[in-house]
Amino acid sequence: MNCNQANQIPLDTIIKAMGYKALAKHSGGQEQWYENPLRTERTPSFSVNHKKNLWQDLGTGQGGKVIDLVMQYSSTNVSGALQWLKENLNSTKIPQSKTTHSARIYEEKKSRFEINKVKRVMNPNLIAYGKERGINSVIIDKHLKETHYTDTETGKTFYGLGIQNQSGGYAVRNKYMKTAIAPNDFTYIEGTGARSNTVNVFEVFFDYLSHLMITQQQEPENKTIILNSTAMAKRAADFLRDSTTIDNVVLFLDNEKEGSKAAEAVERATDYFTALPYAVYIANDTYVGYEDLNACYQATGQAFQIEMRPIKPHDHDLDTGLQM
């Protein structure tokens, strides 16, 4: 099988072979939502255009043909993707082609979303949205940007609250959608505490901002990582692995429904951090009964004590230098 043959296989067949299923159709009729085989999410953002046999992850801006999807799914190259297809699909489902094509037929898909401008947050709708999430305008102004971007496929422009990641991309939220503008990565903040040996790890930036509100800080004292997606957990853990200034890691990850794909993703993310040579704590007891730290803070609207539970003791003193 070559790339041309692979890209003719219906994406519906590929996605089902990965163990995922179709959801409700778009209003347009040609496109359809699917469970996302590349990452966990609460709101469907993975769509397939059946007529063009193309996929798009609206949350990350990635997309392309069959080969692109299998490469992303299996974290492999073109040859590896073709091998995956050979091993996981019945040969009768593979279209035959009389034309020989080189693996060079694969071309990397251009990011769907492009930044137009990034500026200080001044839009009243975004300020109101931040307030709705429990975050005051001072914290919004210090830590987020008003991010305007274009959907290159439709030509439509959008804006939201954004935070830049390590690779120059942005995680963007507004009241109606969550978008990742490639390149995708986690966000790292050094913190103001010169002697702090603790890293706080948050899943999304609203949890980070909620932590600032709860602890009544305008800047974090501890080193901070915002994953922007649990898919970035391994990358973030690798970034921390060889640090000589870290003793403790505190995880503020979501409380997901037991047995769900999202819960599995949180468990994998936790495993990546507990594999590090540091003491590891989880702070979920602080917001038990709520989806995440931001939901808890929205419900209470006031500062409260952060509770931490050790899941991996330090080799020597469990509480050495731990600060919140």
Image: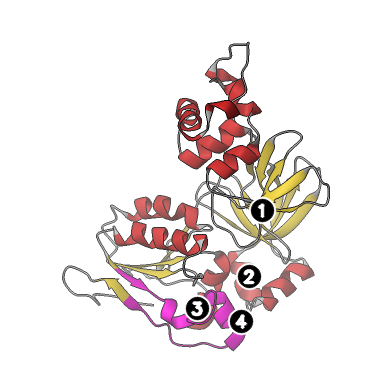
Residue under the image location 54 percent in, 57 percent down: 40
Mark 2 lies on residue: 140
Check disc 4 and give the amino acid type. Answer: Gln
Q: Nearer the viewer, mark 4 or mark 2?
A: 4
Instruction: Judge whether residue 11 can be spotted in this image.
Output: yes
User: Label 3 vs label 4: CA separation?
Assistant: 17 Å
Q: Is residue 189 left or right of residue 57?
A: left
In the displayed structure, 7 sits above or below 301; it is above
Q: Earlier in the sequence, mark 3 or mark 1?
A: 1
Local secondary structure at mark 4: helix
In primary-sequence order, the first of circles 3 and 2 is 2
Please, is residue 283 above or below residue 225 in the view? Answer: below
Instruction: Name the residue at 51% across, 50% down.
Output: 185
Q: Residues within 10 Å of mark 2 (few under 14, many from 20)?
A: many
The answer to if 223 sits in the magenta stretch is: no
User: Looking at the picture, which amino acid does disc 2 mark?
Assistant: Ile
Left or right: where does residue 14 sit relative to residue 125?
Answer: left
How crowded pointer 4 is (Cα within 10 Å; few <14, some 14-19, many 20+) is rated as: some
Q: Which residue is mark 1?
A: 45
Q: Helix, strand, or loop for circle 1?
A: loop
Say whether disc 2 or disc 1 marks the residue closer to the N-terminus: 1
Report the residue marked by disc 3.
217
- Callout 2 secondary element: helix
What is the x, y in percent for residue 276?
28, 58
Q: Which residue is mark 4?
A: 298
Q: Is residue 175 left or right of residue 103?
A: right
